[in-house]
Image (spheres, helix red, strand yellow):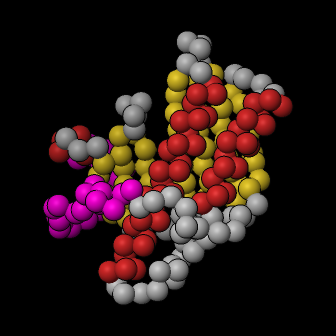
């Protein structure tokens, strides 16, 4: 069963908006053999230029579905979000089915077993974007996050993996879409 947490920034989440979001996202349940028990996090933002941004995150047992969309129409953004989430589910189902078919394993045996395999054709069967075309090997140098950002910029990359000098953990710095930097710390 999907439980909704809908927040609004610069917009009041009215009952019609809440109903529309829930009605649209509830359609994703058809992709599951039984309704998943998940919290759906929805953020609705309206900017001063009247653009509306919708972010949806659905953490499932072995998969996190996440999408965001910005447009001039809040309802159109919600529709586009649902389309993106459907594509993610179908793509994941195809990837898992291909993996277990290649191994000769039973089709229904996989960690994401709640996906209903009778729905949605495998439209990503010939999807080449999952192919690894290059492998690199390198040593992780101990450094702090500021030095890692400098190294990333020197290399002209959008992310950089390093060993944190203090925690000795593997961390990742990355350049965000807004031009600022993010840090991912591993456990």
Which region of the structure is painted magenta?
123-151
Residue 103 appears in the picture as rendered: yes
Residue drawn 52% across the image and 23% down it: 71
Q: Is residue 108 left or right of residue 182?
A: right
Q: Nearer the viewer, residue 43 or 147?
A: 43
Residue 165 appears in the picture as rendered: no
Determine the residue located farthest toward the right in the rendered image. Answer: 15
Q: Where residue 1 appears, x then y in whole percent?
A: 76, 60
Q: Tell me: residue 103, above or below residue 151.
A: below
Q: Is residue 180 left or right of residue 12?
A: left
Quadrant in the picture for residue 14 = top right
Q: Tell me: residue 127, above or below residue 8.
A: below
Q: Tell me: residue 123, above or below residue 78.
A: below
Q: Nearer the viewer, residue 76 or 121?
A: 121
Is residue 136 one of those drawn in magenta? yes
Quadrant in the picture for residue 18 = top right
């Amino acid at each position: 069963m999907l439980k909704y947490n809908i927040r609004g920034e610069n917009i009041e989440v009215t009952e019609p908006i809440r109903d529309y979001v829930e009605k649209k996202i509830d359609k994703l349940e058809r992709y599951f053999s039984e309704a998943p028990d998940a919290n759906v996090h929805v953020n609705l933002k309206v900017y001063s230029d009247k653009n509306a941004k919708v972010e949806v995150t659905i953490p499932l047992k072995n998969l996190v579905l996440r999408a965001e969309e910005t447009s001039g129409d809040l309802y159109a953004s919600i529709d586009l979000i649902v389309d993106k989430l459907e594509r993610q589910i179908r793509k994941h189902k195809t990837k898992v089915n291909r993996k277990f078919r290649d191994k000769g394993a039973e089709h229904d045996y996989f960690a994401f077993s709640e996906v209903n395999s009778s729905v949605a054709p495998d439209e990503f069967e010939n999807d080449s974007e999952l192919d690894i075309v290059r492998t690199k090997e390198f040593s992780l140098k101990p450094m702090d996050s500021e030095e890692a950002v400098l190294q990333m910029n020197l290399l002209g990359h959008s992310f950089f993996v390093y060993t944190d000098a203090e925690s000795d953990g593997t961390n990742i710095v990355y350049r965000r879409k807004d031009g600022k930097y993010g840090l991912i710390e591993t456990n």
